[in-house]
Image: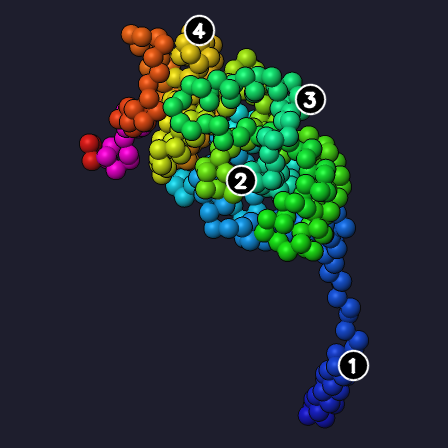
């Protein structure tokens, strides 16, 4: 029995050794290769380089270049490096205005690559309009020039309406098709880059414009879907910039009857604030110009709009309201505009124009009434 046990033991030991040898000498199975990340396409590489060029351009601008330059509303299109929203979160129960909803819908239809290209090109176009373009050359407002007569008539009325220095306030068209001019894009890049790099970046900008079909050769509304007002000490000096894309979308939303007059009236309201060194750091910075614009729209020496058209102006102002403690909610912007209209309608002398300094003072007293109580105050009240 012991002999059989010894034989069995030797057999198992030999089998174990053979198994170990087999494992040790076996050729390891080849691991399945991991999918290699796709190389960026030439278009994606162009867009990435352009995006970097635009970041460097804005970083190379003088410190006060953009001081006081604020958009009509908080667009979903941010220039490279720009913060997406105000630091505070969205206001509970607030619904953004219809124009913002439409703009966000347009933005969501773009691929990330298209959105990046649009962001870079829109930033170039904005800076060109602010600092390079001039009303010394004929300005064409609207994608087909359809708003040019109204824009000219409105700025002329405003210059004679408010008691501020107005001869040097330019009204300039912001056109996406300007991006198709290499000369114009290069001029823009020279504001913050050396001439050699500016020339290369300018050529690249025009190339990207036509490499991305979604941009429609500069006619995509998001490229110019805004308006701006700039003070005297900003790059380019005192001016109002009116985007073709904004006018197209406002028309689409049904506000075409008052589009140019209401928007330019609002942006000129910023010039009223600038003239009195009034730079509020709260929503009154936008709601004040809503009020001044409403006053101009309803006043006998302004647009002299009737009650129905005045209401259309207030609804247009509401359409650009946001929910981020930034420019005012739709209800707040509508209320500010209506307050301004009421000042004109209720005057004993319909031809009297309230001095601009007095109008600012009156609105600043009204402003707290248009704002909801802060959450902390509500909590304390309960």
Q: N-terminal of the two: label 3 or label 2?
A: 3
Q: Main secondary structure of the magenta part?
A: helix
Instruction: Give coordinates of residue 83: x percent, y percent.
Output: 49, 45
Question: How far apart, in angstroms, are the residues tagged by discs 4 and 3?
Answer: 29 Å
User: Given this view, does label 2 or label 4 mark the residue nearer the observer?
Assistant: 2
Question: How far apart, in angstroms, are the residues tagged by discs 1 and 3?
Answer: 78 Å
| Residue 252 on the magenta segment | no
Q: N-terminal of the two: label 1 or label 4?
A: 1
Range of residues picked out in magenta: 368-379
- Residue drawn 36% across the image and 31% down it: 284
Look at the numbered disc 3 and give the secondary structure of its residue: loop
Front residue of this view, candidates 24 and 253: 253
For the residues bearing labels 4 and 3, Cβ distance under 8 angstroms: no
Q: Which residue is mark 3?
A: 144
> Is residue 172 left or right of 340 when viewed as pictured?
right
Instruction: Give coordinates of residue 3: x percent, y percent.
Output: 72, 93
Crowding near the residue tagged with mark 3, few <14, some 14–19, many ≥20 C-alpha atoms within 10 Å: few
For residue 22, above or below residue 257: below
Look at the numbered disc 1 and give the secondary structure of its residue: helix
Q: Which residue is mark 4?
A: 306
Question: How far apart, in angstroms, are the residues tagged by discs 1 and 4?
Answer: 95 Å
Q: Which residue is mark 1?
A: 25
Q: Which mark is residue 236?
A: 2
């Amino acid at each position: 029995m012991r002999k059989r046990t010894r034989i069995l033991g030797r057999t198992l030991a030999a089998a174990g050794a053979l198994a170990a040898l087999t494992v040790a000498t076996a050729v390891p199975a080849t691991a399945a290769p991991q999918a290699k990340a796709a190389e960026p396409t030439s278009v994606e590489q162009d867009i990435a380089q352009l995006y970097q060029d635009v970041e460097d351009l804005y970083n190379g601008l003088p410190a006060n270049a953009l001081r006081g330059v604020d958009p009509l509303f908080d667009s979903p299109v941010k220039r490279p490096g720009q913060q997406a929203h105000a630091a505070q979160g969205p206001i509970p129960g607030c619904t953004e205005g219809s124009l913002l909803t439409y703009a966000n819908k347009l933005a969501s239809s773009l691929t990330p690559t298209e959105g990046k290209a649009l962001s870079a090109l829109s930033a170039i176009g904005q800076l060109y309009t602010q600092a390079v373009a001039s009303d010394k050359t004929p300005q064409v407002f609207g994608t087909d020039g359809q708003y040019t007569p109204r824009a000219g008539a409105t700025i002329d009325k405003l210059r004679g309406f408010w008691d501020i220095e107005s001869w040097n306030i330019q009204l300039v068209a912001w056109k996406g098709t300007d991006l198709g001019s290499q000369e114009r894009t290069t001029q823009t890049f020279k504001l913050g880059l050396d001439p050699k790099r500016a020339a290369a970046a300018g050529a690249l900008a025009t190339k990207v414009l036509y490499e991305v079909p979604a941009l429609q050769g500069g006619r995509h509304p998001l490229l110019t879907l805004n308006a701006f007002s700039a003070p005297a000490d900003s790059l380019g000096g005192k001016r109002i910039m009116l985007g073709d894309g904004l006018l197209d979308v406002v028309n689409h939303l049904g506000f075409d009857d008052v589009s140019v007059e209401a928007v330019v009236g609002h942006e000129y309201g910023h010039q009223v604030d600038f003239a009195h060194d009034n730079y509020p750091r709260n929503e009154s910075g936008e709601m004040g110009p809503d009020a001044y614009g409403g006053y101009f729209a309803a006043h006998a020496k302004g647009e002299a709009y009737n009650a129905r058209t005045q209401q259309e102006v207030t609804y247009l102002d509401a359409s650009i309201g946001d929910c981020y403690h930034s420019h005012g909610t739709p209800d707040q912007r509508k209320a500010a505009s209506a307050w301004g209209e009421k000042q004109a309608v209720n005057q004993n002398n319909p031809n009297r124009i309230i001095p601009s300094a007095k109008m600012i003072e009156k609105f600043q007293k009204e402003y707290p009434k248009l704002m909801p109580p802060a959450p902390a105050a509500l909590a304390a009240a309960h």
